[in-house]
Each structure stands twice: as C-alpha cells, then as structure tokens.
Image (tube, helix red, strand yellow):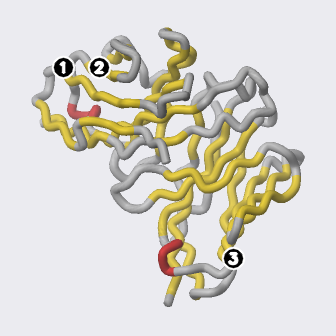
Amino acid sequence: EPEVTQTPSHQVTQMGQEVILRCVPISNHLYFYWYRQILGQKVEFLVSFYNNEISEKSEIFDDQFSVERPDGSNFTLKIRSTKLEDSAMYFCASSVGSLDPSSYNEQFFGPGTRLTVL
Amino acid sequence: QKEVEQNSGPLSVPEGAIASLNCTYSDRVSQSFFWYRQYSGKSPELIMSIYSNGDKEDGRFTAQLNKASQYVSLLIRDSQPSDSATYLCAVKGRSGGGADGLTFGKGTHLIIQP
C-alpha cells in the first residue's frame, strides 16, 4: 500500500532558526498539502500545492513559511525564523486530485514531524 | 469563516454496541465530507468519504450526510476496543477540487469499554 512518508519524525530547534520539513507524497498523486496540529488542538490547513505552485493557503501560512518541490519526489515546508508558537505536529498529505467537484479528492496523511522550538 | 463542530466527548460505548458520532458544518456549499481516525500521537487515518446525501456503508462503518441540515454522522457497528480513538470530521471547500484544504473539527474522543 503506497503511503506518504515524512522526515524527520522529530525536529528540535532554537527560536529564530530555519527548519525544513520533508515529505515524499504518494507517487501518482498530484496535489500536496501541509497541515499542522498544535498539541491538544485541531488539525489546521496550511497550504496546498499543485503543478509546482501554491493553489491555496490559509492565514497561518504567512511570509515565514514557504513550500517547494525541489525534485520529482520530495515536497518541503520551510519555516524561516521559528517561533515558540510554531511548536506542533506538521502533517504532509497528498491526493490524486481532480477538477471534478464530484470527486472525493481523498487526502492521505503522512506520519508527521513533531517540531519543538526552544 | 468555515466551521466544523463536533462534541469532544469522551463518548463511552460498550464493546459490540453501535457508536454514533456527529458533526455539523457551517459552509452550506461544502462539497465533500470525510471521517478520519486519529490515535494519540499519530496522524489522521482516512476512514470514510461521502459526497451525496444519504448513507454510505463500508464494512462496520456507515457515513450519513444531510446537506439540508448541514450534518454528517459516522456509525460504527460492533464496536471493538481497537476503535477507541479520536474521530475527526473534515469538510472540503466549496470548489470541491483538489486545491481545497480540509477544515477539521476538534474531534470526538471515543472509548470502547470491553
């Protein structure tokens, strides 16, 4: 069964440092997403990515965040200058993707990266 | 502002009984609806997706959608202790296309009592 993978599983960083979280989406999927979940809170959408550009982003996804598909398999989330409040689980997800609104566009999540900002 | 509401629980159900989980959403033009299961410290795992009004069954799981009432539910038959988890309701945006992020509820914590 194909699955989304993420590295590292746990990242510890100092406030103000840059971090890059990595994801390998399911190989035939066209849409990629990043979500975060602060401990004890709900899963929140950050950004969606299609055809090498951002499709949609939430208010959380400010100038401190960026995404990139540096090669044919990896999808990355960069946080330029981490803050204490960036501590969270970050989930990558992917979907086959369809312009047909009747499609479910089911999103499959990776195991997550726990980011701890000290 | 799109909102998805769920009772946080915990919802305690005896083993073998039916667990009923409910969700309401605010955006009337939402197109697609999903139930995820999340074990503590793990990522969301897709259980069911539903688009049309009515029921959709998959094994022990049945999803129900009522767009007029903006209501989605998940029934779990013959509940097992391994079903104990947090169940997340998620709603996809108005376009229904692949670009839309999911809006999640806070989840219902389900406990199946042996």
The mark found on residue B77 in the picture is 3
Q: Determine the chain carrying the residue at label 1.
A: A
Looking at the image, do the residues carrying marks 3 and 1 touch, with CB atoms under 8 Å apart? Answer: no
Q: Determine the chain carrying the residue at label 3.
A: B
Q: Percent x, y for residue B29?
A: 80, 32
Residue B92 against residue B107 in the figure, above or below:
above
Dot 1: within a 10 Å radius of its alpha carbon, few (fewer than 14), some, or many (20 or more) residues?
some
Circle 3: element type: loop
The mark found on residue A18 in the picture is 1
Q: Reading the chain from its start, which is encountered first: label 2 or label 1?
A: 1
Mark 2 → mark 1, Cα distance in angstroms: 7 Å
Looking at the image, do the residues carrying marks 2 and 1 touch, with CB atoms under 8 Å apart? Answer: yes
Q: Percent x, y for residue A46?
A: 46, 27
Kindly indicate the quadrant of the structure image that contains residue A12.
top left
Query: Which residue is at 36% across, 38% downward?
Result: A5
Say if residue A58 shows up in the picture: no
Q: Percent x, y for residue B55?
A: 84, 59
Dot 3: within a 10 Å radius of its alpha carbon, few (fewer than 14), some, or many (20 or more) residues?
some
Mark 3 → mark 2, Cα distance in angstroms: 43 Å
View extreme (bottom): residue: B114
Say if residue A72 shows up in the picture: yes
Q: Determine the chain carrying the residue at label 2.
A: A
Query: Which residue is at 85% across, 45% downward?
Result: B52
Type of the residue with mark 1 = Glu
Pointer 2 residue: A78
Circle 2: element type: strand
Type of the residue with mark 3 = Arg
Q: Is residue B91 left or right of residue A102?
A: left
Mark 3 or mark 1, which is nearer to you? 3
